Image: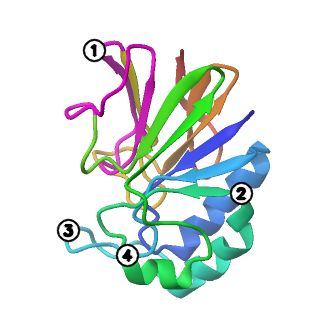
Amino acid sequence: MKLMFASDIHGSALYCERMLEAFRREGAERLCLLGDILYHGPRNDLPDGHDPKRVIALLNPEKSHILCVRGNCDTEVDQMVLEFPVLADYAVIFVDGRTFFLTHGHHHSPENLPPLNPGDVLINGHTHIYKAEQVNGIHCLNDGSVSLPKMGNPRSYMTYEDGVFTVKQLETGETLLEYSL
């Protein structure tokens, strides 16, 4: 099974469109959105192409492919306009015999691990910086940000297939980082 992970769209229709182009290009079965879908929050500048209503129109037709968790900028009103669940603080999925804990990252992160076992996988966004590391035997991955990358990073997303996580540059699909379980 191929999965795609993306986070921190922050209401940018421009980068949401590019993310969906990448999703189609990748041929992934599921698009796992790790929060901060429609709004930019008080700490971020408006992203290029800011148009939350257009983001809604782009994502709702993909609802059968989306698994989403709530980010710190997501609110109950978002659930009123998005046709897929967006308010869960985390999701636990089982892939290739492993537990994947998906969350935004403002509660659980490599610095504040959820109750996982060595060999399990924590996947989060929130920092807008892609990363892969092992903390206390737990594989910790961050896909970066689709619209507002930080620390000089490019816009990015991440795929998982056959035991390998690959962080890729949003527009080109160029590999930025590979991490094998």
Instruction: Indicate which disc, 2 or 3, sits on the residue closer to the N terminus.
Output: 3
Query: Which picture quadrant has residue 85?
Result: bottom right
Mark 1–mark 2 distance (CA, rounded to whole Å)? 32 Å
- The relative height of residue 164 versus residue 157 in the rendered view (above or below) is above
Crowding at dot 3, Cα within 10 Å, few <14 / some 14-19 / many 20+, comes out as few
The magenta segment is: 110-137
Is residue 160 in view from this perspective? yes
The local secondary structure at tag 4 comes to loop
Instruction: Indicate which disc, 1 or 2, sits on the residue closer to the N terminus.
Output: 2
Q: Nearer the viewer, residue 115 or 31?
A: 115
Colour setup of the view: rainbow
The local secondary structure at tag 3 comes to loop
Mark 4 against mark 1, which lies toward the viewer? Answer: 1
Q: Is residue 89 left or right of residue 108?
A: right
Q: Which residue is mark 1?
A: 136
The local secondary structure at tag 2 comes to helix
Q: Amino acid at mark 3?
A: Arg
Give me the disc on residue 1. none
Instruction: Indicate which disc, 4 or 2, sits on the residue closer to the N terminus.
Output: 4
Crowding at dot 2, Cα within 10 Å, few <14 / some 14-19 / many 20+, comes out as some
Q: Which residue is mark 3?
A: 43
Q: How many marks?
A: 4
Mark 4–mark 2 distance (CA, rounded to whole Å)? 22 Å
Residue 90: image location, x then y, percent: 41, 49
- The relative height of residue 144 versus residue 181 in the rendered view (above or below) is below
Q: Which residue is mark 2?
A: 65
Pick the quarter of the image with the N terminus.
top right
Q: Which residue is mark 4?
A: 39
Pick the quarter of the image with the C terminus.
top right
Residue 112 included in the magenta stretch of the image: yes
Q: Nearer the viewer, residue 71 or 165?
A: 71
Mark 4–mark 1 distance (CA, rounded to whole Å)? 33 Å
